[in-house]
Amino acid sequence: MESVPQDTVTRHDWRLEEIEALFELPFNDLLFQAQTTHRRHFDPNAVQVSTLLSVKTGACPEDCKYCPQSVRYDTGLERESLMDVDEVVRAAERARAAGATRFCMGAAWRSPKRKDLEAMCRMVEAVKALGMETCVTAGMLTAEQAQTLKETGLDYYNHNVDTSPEYYDQVVTTRTYEDRLDTLENVREAGLKTCCGGIVGMGETVRDRARMLQVLANLPEHPGSVPINQLIQVPGTPFHGLDPVDPLDFVRTIAVARIIMPRSYVRLSAGRTEMSDETQALCFMAGANSIFYGDKLLTTGNPDADHDRRLLERLGLRFETVEGETVTPPKPEDAEAARA
Ligand code: SAM
Ligand code: DTB
Ligand code: SF4
């Protein structure tokens, strides 16, 4: 078997066999290596906290087989037009009072039209003015669109590769893997930070997971944030009814992401409502250091903020501030008081 390097630095030349060898390690060895890597670069007891808001919901023309927002699947989702800036700001204020440092605005588009992008820019400016980090996910971007968002003050753009290049056509047919990589390049070239990850549990093999992580780690820059989502199976989507992921395999994916992208924030993303507290604890142990916080993701549920606060408290984990310090998550009554 391949020997696995113990002292990993930031590399962009990961070979598939090396990554597969990490996946094959005994669980304890893998977690030890991931935790050791994590401690070298991060406060092991700090978690970066982002809150999501769907600013334009449903009726998306793309056919992503996991997504409740595709117009092609009957998921019973009500479509909603683009939100007003004021409404977005109120949601961001609530998220900030609850302790989130980053506000991620999602729009169900293939790519934004001119007036859509202008509206998103107004949202970014207004949320930025609250002192929060901003993130947008709105589909494919041209170089000019990425530049416009950068000039508005946007910090992160989220665009996931979702899976391996080999499995991609089983997941999405309306745009190519190359399209995704092109948008990521446009985002990077504009000087925006990238948030880029994928989904586990769409029927892919362990090799596909390794390939997906290889693509991410071998990008010219490691993404600033790497969201690892567990598929949320939404009735009406083609991927509803697939076999669930073994929780330990999910933890392994987090651990490998941590080892090969040692300085990125690895986000334990969608799917936490289906995970036990113990599985989530293992994910943090494996090097996850970011979560989506708040009762909703984009259109589906997320654990209650109350539950998350208790979980983090039980684990001795604290929220990271924008300045890189850590704080105890504000209690709802404190958050209420901060709003008043
Ligand atoms: N339309 C934009 C796009 O595709 O880039 C932005 C929004 S899209 C909902 C953002 C990401 O959420 C997807 O790339 C996918 O990785 C993740 N996602 C969507 N539906 C999901 C589901 N049911 N389970 C897990 N992750 C999901
Ligand atoms: C990411 O990787 N996961 C988030 C965020 N980036 C935009 C979205 C998860 C969406 C889950 C399904 C839903 O709520 O619609
Ligand atoms: Fe549209 Fe994004 Fe959902 Fe795909 S993942 S259907 S592009 S909203």
Image: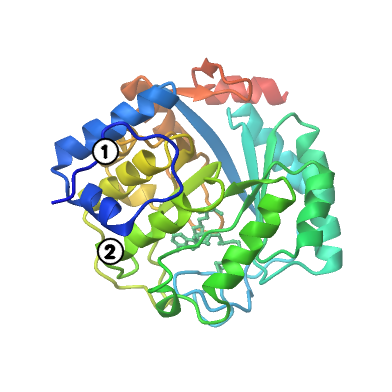
User: Split into 4 quadrants, where in the image is the C terminus?
Assistant: top right
Left or right? Give the position of 244 relative to 148: left
Q: Is mark 1 within 8 Å of ligand 2?
A: no
Residue 267: in sight, yes or no?
Answer: yes
According to the image, label 1 marks what residue?
A: 5
Mark 2: C-beta under 8 Å from nearest atom of ligand 1: no
Q: Reading the chain from its start, which is encountered first: label 1 or label 2?
A: 1
Instruction: Look at the numbered disc 1 and give the secondary structure of its residue.
Output: loop
Which amino acid type is shown beneath numbered disc 2? Answer: Arg
Question: Does 296 sit above or below residue 186?
Answer: above
CA neighbours of label 1 inside 10 A, class few (<14), some (14 to 19), many (20+): few
Query: Quadrant of the rendered structure where residue 111 is?
Result: bottom right
Which residue does the image show at 40% across and 22% down from the upper left?
A: 45
Q: How is the image coloured?
A: rainbow
Residue 48, percent from left and from top: 51, 31
Amino acid at pointer 1? Pro
The residue positioned 65% from the left and 70% from the top of the image is: 79
In this rendered view, identify the residue nearer to me: 207 or 74.
207
